[in-house]
Image (cartoon, grey):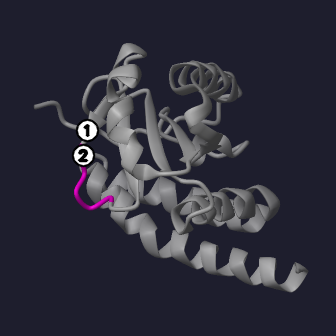
Amino acid sequence: MTISVVELQPYNPDWEHRFEWEKKSISEALGDSLIEVEHIGSTSIKGLAAKPIIDIMAGVHNLELVDAWIPSLMEIDYEFVHKPEFTDRRFFRKGLWGQGICHLHICEYDSTEWREKLLFRNYLRLYPEALREYASLKEELAQIHKFDRHAYTERKGPFIKKIIEMARGDEQNTS
């Protein structure tokens, strides 16, 4: 089995172009089944170093229909990865294990999963201090957990939850 190494790269403006290309490909494969497709994760935030994996979130009406789309997604090189811990989304990978180039998260549009991913992304886009704090945490964790992507991801969890709560507070204060 290949070891999944955590290697952050400086922000690359090409990530946005790669996302747009993948969005078009996914939209063509799934057609009217999709409500919306969003670029999420660190590659979606200008200036943030990231693992060079484009994270894509696709919103659908009914998660139960996703199994029927597996063949269409396989045709555009997305492999379904069964993750029992993901009860609120379905996960697909493009690229070899541990060397993926895209991750596709399909969830119900406007679900908690959908809203939280957008809250986190949008908050970091709006607040440079929070972005700097996250960038620093990622760099530190990437050094400590270079050969343990799972630990790297898990250790970011408390910060991500904190930002989501702050973003929710902002949302309530502006409504």
At horizontal 58% and vertical 19% (from top left) the residue drawn is 28
Region in magenta:
82-86
The question of residue 120 being in magenta is answered with: no
Q: Taking 98 as reference, is 77 above or below it?
A: above
In the image, what residue type sits under mark 1? Ser
Q: Nearest to the eye among marks 2 and 1: give it.
A: 1
In the image, what residue type sits under mark 2? Phe
Circle 1 SS class:
loop
Q: Read off the residue under disc 2.
A: 147
First in residue order: circle 2 vs circle 1: 1
At horizontal 66% and vertical 56% (from top left) the residue drawn is 121
Q: Taking 84 as reference, is 60 above or below it?
A: above
Quadrant location, the C terminus: bottom right
Q: Position of residue 89 (x, y in %)?
A: 41, 54
- In this rendered view, identify the residue nearer to me: 155 or 103: 103
Instruction: Name the dominant secondary structure of the magenta segment.
Output: loop
At horizontal 75% and vertical 67% (from top left) the residue drawn is 129
Residue 4: numbered disc: 1
Left or right, residue 144 beside residue 159? left
- In this rendered view, identify the residue nearer to me: 120 or 107: 107
Q: Taking 166 as reference, is 136 above or below it?
A: above
Left or right, residue 66 beside residue 1? right
Residue 69: numbered disc: none
Neighbourhood count class around disc 1 (C-alpha, 10 Å): few under 14, some 14–19, many 20 upward: some
Q: Are marks 2 and 1 in contact (CB under 8 Å)?
A: yes
Circle 2 SS class:
loop
Q: CA distance from mark 2 to mark 1?
A: 6 Å
At horizontal 81% and vertical 61% (from top left) the residue drawn is 126
